[in-house]
Amino acid sequence: MTFGSLNFVNPFGVWENPGSTAGDFYAVNFEKKAVSGRVILNLGPQHPSTHGVLRVLVELDGEYVARAEPVLGYLHRMHEKMGEVKTPWQFIPNMGRVDYLHPLAWNWAFVGAAEKLAGLTVPERAEYLRVIGCELNRIGSHLLWWGAFVMDLGGFTPILYAFEEREKINDILQIITGSRLTMANFRFGGVCADADERFFRLCAEFIPYLRERLKMYKGLVTDNVILRRRLEGIGPIDVDLCQRYGATGPILRAAGLARDTRKDYPYGVYPKLDFPIPTGPINDSFGRYLVRLAEIETSLSIIEQAIKDIPQGPIIMDKAPKATWKLPAGESYFTVEGARGQIAAHITSDGGKNPYRVKLRAPGFSNLSLFAEAAKGTLLADAIAILGSLDLVIPEIDR
């Protein structure tokens, strides 16, 4: 039997090619379960619709998806294991590599867990700077998703607008982070750099600018009859399906459940800020689209309030931990709201120079896991729309 470039020699999934991977073994077993006459199609691991090194095996009955299975393992970098062989200070930059679209949320999860374990108190100004940075980062993530999602459906222009806005956000975040992608400005007990007058001026200019652009996006894309026919009624994901797979974030809120870590497990200065939790009246692909656009407006409102209320003062605690700092023995769990859902870091320490164990909770893993069930019975083109509506970032899933 031939599958791609591999020659399989027996029904137990043993292959001749010594360089074959576990993913190939998975493909053999997937094909063995296929119904005669159906087509097995590979989407990925490198494919325009997957936005990362993700492989989706699809069994097609004509144009309809009879079965779909995501296959991970092509991008695994052992972040959690690195957390056990690095000092806490050395591990901070890893967080920006777990999710390169919302790195500041991952910064906060790990640093927050360490601060909780050590009982560190973060100055109020630093907490406000963390909120502003995280919300700007969230907007950038949602914008890139928006542009890439529409491109999956055949519309090229929106991603050019998305990158234009994202560059403006990166201009702002670069002032306080020194980076434009894998940002890591959080420190144990605060942040590494203060915001200057230019930072606040650019923020104040960007907020009304993006609000006007969102109106343009509504006319150009959201109300476009082609987009709506591609998304409305496609891939409904209800609360029960979300809860069975542990899906959080915009997917769960589009299903109608108003759950948000910033409200449910308050952290930072979020309790001092007034903002709604956008939820969807519809739980299909279009509903998930609408929730994320509504969350952009929510983030703008949060940034506006934070800039207005931010106090003067230090940006890092007195006697902040140095590079040789050791976590006290014990364990802690800290969770934040990322662009894709609930992020969490669980740290266990035995008092040594490195954490004994670091476990990361990535929302994308749960969100991807429900795809097989959500895509079953849909047209292949609709399965691509469902996959795009999940906003997957493979590095955090295959961490």
Image (cartoon, grey):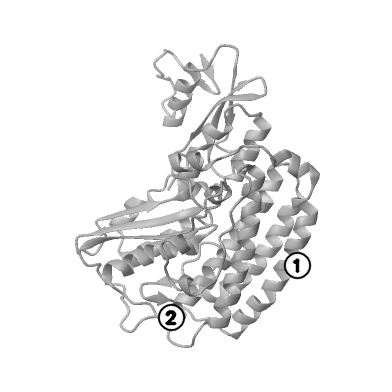
Furthest toward the bottom, the residue is 312
Amino acid of disc 1: Glu
Left or right placement of residue 286 versus residue 398 in this view: right
Q: Is residue 369 above or below residue 92?
A: above
Res. 212 mark? 1
Looking at the rendered structure, the secondary structure element under dot 1 is helix
Say if mark 2 contacts mark 1, CB within 8 Å.
Answer: no
Q: Quadrant of residue 47?
A: top right
Q: Earlier in the sequence, mark 2 or mark 1?
A: 2
Instruction: Give the residue at x 38% y 77%.
Output: 122
Q: Is residue 180 visible?
A: no
Please name the residue shown 79% across and 48% down the image.
224
Q: Nearer the viewer, residue 39 or 262?
A: 262
Residue type at the position of mark 2: Glu
**Camera-side residue of 157 and 340:** 340
Find residue 165 and report its image quarter: bottom right
Residue 201: x and y, percent? 65, 81
- Answer above or below: position of 277 versus 155: below
Tell me if mark 1 has few (under 14), some (14-19) or many (20+) residues whose alpha carbon lies within 10 angstroms of its own. few
- Residue at image point 58% right, 38% down: 46
Distance Cα–Cα, label 2 vs label 1: 32 Å
Q: Where is residue 239 drawn, in percent x and y? A: 51, 43
Residue 9, percent across and down?
44, 13
Question: Percent position (x, y) of residue 206?
Answer: 68, 73
Which label sits on residue 124?
2
- Label 2 sits on a secondary structure element that is helix
